[in-house]
Amino acid sequence: MTVSPLPRRTAYAVLAALAAVVILVSTAIFVGVGKNDGTAEPATGHGNEAAPASAGTWVGTWATSPTAAEPERANGFPRVSIRNVVRISVGGERIRIRLSNLYSSRPLTISHASVALAAAPSDPAADSDSMRRLRFDNRTSVTIPAGAHVISDPARLRVPDASDLLVTTYSPNPSGAVTYHPHARQISYAARGDHTEDTSGLAYTEQSPYWRYLTGVDVWTNKARGSVVVLGDSITDGITSTMGANHRWPDFLAERLRTERGAPRLGVLNQGISGNRVLTGGNQTPPHNPSGLSRFDRDVLGQTGVRAVVIHLGVNDILRLPHETNPDRIVGGLRQMVEQAHARGLRVVGGTLMPFYGHRGFTPELNGVRQAVNDQIRAGEVFDEVVDFDAALRDPAQPLRLLPQYDSGDHLHPSDEGYRAMARALNLQHLRGVAAATL
């Protein structure tokens, strides 16, 4: 059979149409497709784990858990620029942020937002070449409904690993309660008026130990394969670590993942909340300091590119009133989290509970609950893998207490060196691969 060639004009039209399709598909894959909530994701999907690293993917590089409504801030921060300072774990070629209005009963309008590299660690001044205006569904202003969050459009900004970022928001109007994370262990800044794109830090005369509104940073990268979420309490939050030094134990974990040969390339997302428990959260609606069980879907499964989970929770169930004295209830709550992770094909590493002899809450009975929980964890009855923080940080001569150089002084929370020892105790290879999904 003879096939007649297409007329030249028709052939050119077909080629032009094919070229247009290729361009459109390529643009959708690289730039992303906007959603109604302000997200912008690759066409392969949010955190698509099947995409090869060489093609690039969105990876969570920093996160914090929205914890409560900031006291005495019922009207928000009208006509104030808030400049949050955060240290990311892995870098990339593009960046997007997540803002939360979870604890307000009123909409939050952000009329202007920006992201930039800090000129120096913990400094409100920006590297002048890095300042980027943020957009939301291609608009510079966004209104976040009460109880909701929004993700910005991607901004072109090459950010190195372990960079300090400045994420600045400006709200022109009163907006209700401020969603915040109270124990940042990092100084952030505020300025009267709209100084969102100021590269100078001179206007930022007000300091704050909180992170406000900002709950996540993602990067588009071909260097990392995903992220690991660390779910914990004040020990994970790093409440006794040196202010501004980034010496929480997840920070030391991120350093190991960046620098050690053969380590999996993963972002680290710190979802520690001081005072957090497995089983019980606050009585407010939504609850302040929500339990690990109630926030697991949001703070772990809802994160970008999550590949593995580390859980270190349970000591506050024992120490805080009302005391949980049944170890099986604590372990049962931990198992429920593992089941949720397995349903998503995620591997879970769990940490033993460290000693607290000398702490004001210590009693032999409560220590017995701790040891009973640890016995089940070590027996492999709870998690896919175990990191034995108890063995790594206790005093061999007096195993009911922390080794003195690892003790911050309150006999419960580690020192900076103790946090470093926690990160050192984790087998990085346990963060590889996925667990068998439970159907």
Image (cartoon, rainbow, N blue to C red):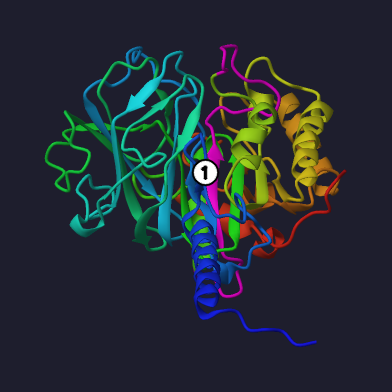
Q: Residue at x 72, y 26 (%)?
A: 366
x then y, percent, for residue 419: 52, 50
Span of residues in magenta: 259-287
Number of residue marks? 1
The residue that label 1 is drawn on is 414
x then y, percent, for residue 109: 34, 24
Q: Eyeballing the image, is 30 above or below 11? A: above
Q: Is residue 376 magenta?
A: no
Report whether residue 249 is seen.
no
Q: Nearer the viewer, residue 313 or 421?
A: 313
Q: Is residue 353 left or right of residue 112?
A: right
Q: Is the magenta stretch mostly helix, strand or loop?
A: loop
Q: In this view, does 415 lie to the left or right of 346?
A: left
Q: Is residue 134 left or right of residue 410?
A: left
In the rendered image, the quadrant that contains the C terminus is top right
Q: Nearer the viewer, residue 434 or 335?
A: 434
Q: Residue furthest left?
A: 202
x then y, percent, for residue 298: 61, 34
